[in-house]
Amino acid sequence: LGGVTISLEVEPSIEYDNNIFATSDDPTEDVSYNLRSQAVLSHQTGNFTASLTGDVDLRRYFEETGQNADAGGVEGTLVWSPRTEEVASIVASIDRVIEDRGDPEARVNPDLGPRAVRVSSVEAGYRRARGKLLFDFGAEATEFDALSPLDDDRDFFVAGGIAKLGVRVAGQAFATASAFYSNRDFRLETSPQGVNRDAQIYGGRLGVDFLPGGLFEGGFSVGVFRNEPEDPSIAPRTGLSLDGLLTFYPRRRMALIFEASRGDVATFRGGAAGRTDTSARVTWQHEIRHNLFSSLSLGYLESNFEESNITQETVIARGEIEYLIGRNVSVLGNISFGDRDSDLALEEFDRRRGGISLRFRF
């Protein structure tokens, strides 16, 4: 419309879940019907591109109607790219996020609906990867606001940044060194147990980045993080830090994606002085034919709750296939299997989910 491009995607679906509360005993199964939609408005003028994205995700259960949930959000982006491999951007967003029952510290009471959290974020970045050197700087501020008064102790604000420098070592590859810092500030002065959970987290990593256009794209880095709590009763700790999103293209229309991360995250569990998450996932994507796409993934998440002697380990396998009926319509099918082991028997579960949906693109 004039200089504005509008795109719309709508996806109604039916999904089965054999354990909607992710419990260890007497799982409850149900079927939900869902509606996901997204609209994007974008405009380009010279070296500037502006976009506005809105999305809605509505879920309704046939029997357990108390678990119905509405999610969605809006995001605005401004990108400036004066030349190839140089870009500056600023992104602002507000989202209503619905917690999954299989999350490490999810709500366990089946009489209450899933937890809803408002996430407000502003992010700015600059990246330049021309010639021999790579410069990548980013800053972000995010507020997490759990909408139920029962969860006031989960509200916190985090702000920080990262700086990455790289040197081209061969072709599209850069050897990199990065430093990061964040400050976590909880809204309540102390937790229900009387502990100040505010903290500063900083560290550094060494790694490699690959520019698009070759067999590899993305990057991977490894280093250390340091958590410095505000509360003198909590000991500082140091741990391994990982950050990676690397795609390998063995041939045209095929991609193998590796993701990994390890670091300090916010925790709300009583008795835990902190929490370290380690995650890894590998995904295989294949364009089988011009109108048939497949995706298979295997993921792992370990949550280690410091000083409480509790560790959770979750494995999730997922598969999806999409068939294009026409230019604007496709049908999708997906299935997933999840299993969690924990030092607390009540936190263990296994879960099977599957669904079918139609996707309309305009």
Image (spheres, grey):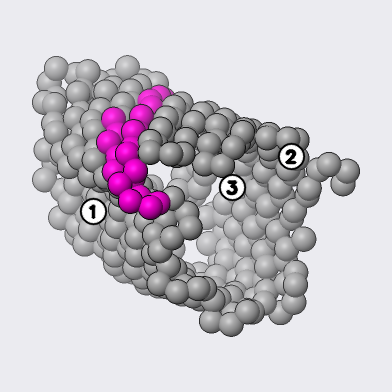
Q: How far apart are marks 1 and 2 (CA)?
A: 43 Å
The quadrant in which residue 186 appears is top left
Residue 217 magenta: no
Q: Which amino acid does label 3 sit on?
A: Ala
* Mark 1 vs 3: CB contact within 8 A: no
In this rendering, would 191 be left or right of 352?
A: left
Q: Which residue does the numbered mark 1 point to in the structure image?
A: 302
Q: What residue type is labelled 2?
A: Gln
Front: mark 3 or 2: 2
Residue at left offset 25%, top offset 27%? 202
Residue 33 visible to the viewer: yes
Magenta-drawn segment: 156-179
Measure the alpha-carbon separation of dots 3 and 2. Answer: 29 Å
Report how many numbered discs are placed on residues in the image.
Answer: 3
Q: What element carries label 1?
A: strand
The disc placed on residue 71 is 3
Q: Where is residue 173 in the image (x, y as percent from the top left)?
A: 35, 50
Q: Say which element carries label 2.
A: strand
